[in-house]
Image (tube, rainbow, N blue to C red):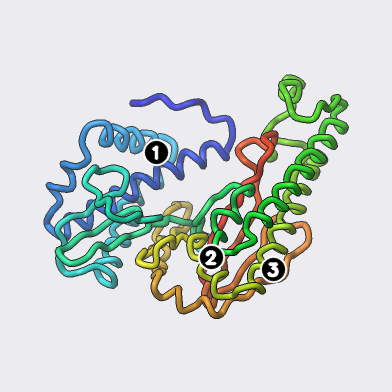
Amino acid sequence: MKEYQPIDTTAQKEALINEFKGNLFEYLVAQFLARHYRIEADFVRSFGGDIRKQLTDYDHWLRVNEPDLIKQLPKLAKEVSLELIDKVLPASATKVLVIGKTLAVPHSKDWAEADLLVLNIDKVYPISLKLCKGNAFVNTKSAGVKSFINQYFCGFSNASLLQNNINRGVDSRFELMAQELHSHVGLDFYGRFDHRWADSGHSELPGQLPKDLNAIVVQSYYDCIKDIYETLKDLYKEDKVLFGKSLLPLMGIGDVDIIQITCFHKEVKGIRYNFSGIHLLYGQELMNDLEMIEILPLKESISSFEIQLNHLKLQIRVKPMNKFTSAAFKINCSIKEIK
């Protein structure tokens, strides 16, 4: 079994759990589908060598570190596969593929956020899989602040200008944050973080900072989200139709043919990861909601805001990179169904 680096924080453990459970979940859903279509032997053969060893390592690690999850994961995968068979997929299929883990994936199209492809003679069904705690926002996209507008709102003629304005704000706020942090701990500031910060015993992870230092760091996120918020409001006023279409990739629908299925889990009597429900999101249907967009008011001292689309909320949040000492922030996007 592969040896993994020691886990120092809860966040590091959660990151490993999310990575491992995601890969195993994709495999299990695909395996259930292949079994339903009586092509399981062909599917299993495509998972040989290094891929199979990697999945086995993930399984072993989770059995030790998250035993509830490894017990419940096949049950959750089965619920998802049954929902797809009942509401989405055709009566017959010739192949079930996990994108990125088999070589036989069709290359004629960029399948965006799809995790699985189900193929029959006439059509390809791209499936995006999500596994999430019940009643929580579902992560759909992560991007760097310094490329966010250029990447996702490139259809606007002034996208580059707006991006440059945001970048200048990020740079100035990051420098101000670094100056304040150095001043608080009695270190001279030479224009950037260097080895002296960590050598003096200070963490580079915001969650491990004392409250007074953490407040300085998160203030820079609040200031940055204001710039993103005002920029998106301006783009919405400029062209509501183009703005709506630009939101689709942020919701995990980079292609309108994508079918996004989210499996929710909950804790029951001390046992976690019990099946809680399923949400299906069709790219084609989502196109009809783009005329009902509302950018909700920005709240004070919160590094995120929400955009409402009929039965969905899209949350856009500014966060640090892995270490706040890096001169960049990232944007996390997530969605939640409005019931």
Percent across and percent down for residue 332 are 58, 53
User: How many angstroms separate mark 2 from mark 3 (CA)?
Assistant: 14 Å
Q: Is residue 193 left or right of residue 127?
A: right
Q: Is residue 217 left or right of residue 114?
A: right
Please identify the quarter of the rendering in which residue 325 is found.
top right
Above or below: residue 176 compared with residue 111: above
Looking at the picture, tell me which residue is in the foreground, 32 or 198.
198
Identified by mark 3, the residue type is: Asp
Please identify the quarter of the rendering in which residue 47 is found.
top left
Q: Residue at x 68, y 58 (%)?
A: 228
Q: Residue at x 73, y 24 (%)?
A: 194
Q: Residue at x 79, y 35 (%)?
A: 178
Question: What residue is shown with label 3?
Answer: 234
Q: Is residue 248 left or right of residue 102?
A: right
Please identify the quarter of the rendering in which residue 279 is found.
bottom left
Point out which mark residue 305 bears: none
Question: What residue is shown with label 1?
Answer: 62
Mark 3, mark 1: which one is toward the viewer? 3
Dot 2: element: helix
User: How many angstroms separate mark 3 from mark 1 (CA)?
Assistant: 46 Å
Q: Is residue 147 visible?
A: yes
Question: Count the marks: how many?
Answer: 3
Q: Residue at x 69, y 62 (%)?
A: 231
Q: Quadrant of the N terminus?
A: top left
Q: Earlier in the sequence, mark 3 or mark 1?
A: 1
Point out which mark residue 247 bears: 2
User: How many angstroms separate mark 1 from mark 2 (CA)?
Assistant: 35 Å
Q: Earlier in the sequence, mark 1 or mark 2?
A: 1
Dot 3: element: helix
Identified by mark 2, the residue type is: Leu
